[in-house]
Amino acid sequence: MNLYPAHPVLLVDDEEEILTSLRITLALAGITNTILCPDGSAALDMARGQEIEAALLDVLMPGRKGDEILEGLLNVQPDLPVIMVTGVDDVDLAVSCMRKGAYDYIRKPADPERIVSALTRAFELRTMRRERRNLSAGFLNPAPPKSEAFSELVTHSPAMLRIFQYCEAIAASPEPVLITGETGVGKELLARAIHVASARKGEFVAVNVAGLDDQAFSDTLFGHVRGAFTGADRARGGFMERAAGGTLFLDEIGDLPLQAQIKLLRVLQEREFYPIGSDRPKPLTARIISATNRSEGELSDTQRFRSDFYFRIATHSLTIPPLRHRPEDIALLTDHFLAQAARTYGHEIEMPSRWLELLRKYAFPGNIRELRAMILDAAGRSRNGQLCLDALAEKLSPAQPARRCAMPDQMFSGFLELPTLQEGSEALVAEAMKRAGGNQRRAAMLLGITPQALNSRLKRRSSSPA
């Protein structure tokens, strides 16, 4: 059985009936990792021996009182959220406990929903404190550039390494993660890396939710019981059940219909779901990681995306930068894909170094996925170990869609007089020919014009009077 949360919840009360009732109440809410303790001193011993996620502590017990045990628990684990529970309506006692560091204060008989809500918020607090501690330790004592969990992501970009550091800090959190970024940047690959870093025991299960209608969404994620609808001749578990104790990756979450958003929001809030046709909930023990190529502005559009749903799935959030913002990775990725091609075709394939400069200047609207396809296609057409440069030239030609660099707003601010259009054009042509080493085809690609147009300009320049 997969326990939730990863570290146990400590229940401390001298009445065994209350402890048993609390355990059942929490188990029904999906909180299955609990330790029952009828003695305050024993609770301190348990806290010294293992990390505790949160504690429910009775105030009035024989021997040492609850507020004394509170101080002892916080001395052992300073970040521990401790919720005090008492049958005495004593404001001074409640204030005293809060001043000593208690997270919350609940009166008996405690409403089950109040207890579950308080613990859920306590888990979130514990997670944030743990992340803050991990991040601080990471910045003060820099870890190796990239841990083994992220070995499949080929990069030495400082921006990406900072993302890996953040992912390691939040890996153990049960809270949802939202990964944004353009198509082809590697969002699913990063989600898998977070799963590996989390050391969760269950599977990594990926599902693309774009285009699923309400019925298909519910059946895919929640499953159904036998007889739930026509054709349901046997029960089927959904992806949430399959990913129990692991990670459920929801790709293209930005295209999820509003009705499905409402259903998933409830599941994330209550940490339970109902298979279609069943009136008995199942606990959600999978960690949810979502991904979308939509921007934060698009996701904030309440006409197509609920704001409460957005904030729930984005408890932790990060954006993978596009490849054009990581030019330092292009040579590394090119070598990686050439090595893949060599294994596929059975021989080494070389790329002339001058072509790397062209790759660095290309905008890569399809990001890493486009670079991979480009290199593998050129490698497949290679002859005698030489990359087919014509194939690359086709991809990098001006006819292909590519976003060019924006001109700086203050580019000409230092000029007393502006150059004429002809002077500016000639200067650009001269600079392109210089960067291309005299190669007209390459210079034309740098300028975004055809080789014939460049040749015509060069001829006009050579025939003009000095």
Image (cartoon, grey):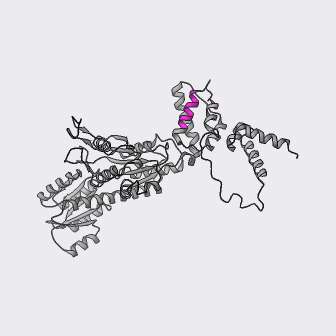
Q: Position of residue 6 (x, y in %)?
A: 29, 50
Along the horizontal axis of the image, is 157 left or right of 459? left
Figure quadrant of the N terminus: top left
- Decide: is 341 above or below 35: above
Along the horizontal axis of the image, is 143 left or right of 66? right
Q: Position of residue 192 (x, y in %)?
A: 40, 42
Along the horizontal axis of the image, is 356 left or right of 219? right
Q: Residue at x 21, y 73 (%)?
A: 93
The span picked out in magenta is 371-389
Residue 443 falls within the magenta-colored stretch: no
The answer to which quarter of the image holds residue 199 is top left
Q: Position of residue 28 (x, y in %)?
A: 20, 52
Q: Position of residue 378 (x, y in %)?
A: 58, 31
- Decide: is 75 above or below 94: above
Q: Residue at x 36, y 43 (%)?
A: 212
**Residue 86 seen by the camera:** yes
Query: Residue extending furthest bottom?
Result: 92
**Residue 439 seen by the camera:** no
**Quick one: 136 or 215, which is closer to the camera?**
215
Residue 378 falls within the magenta-colored stretch: yes
Q: Residue at x 76, y 49 (%)?
A: 427
**Quick one: 91 or 53, which is closer to the camera?**
91
The answer to which quarter of the image holds residue 99 is bottom left
Query: Residue extending furthest right?
Result: 465
The answer to which quarter of the image holds residue 460 is top right
Along the horizontal axis of the image, is 308 left or right of 114? right
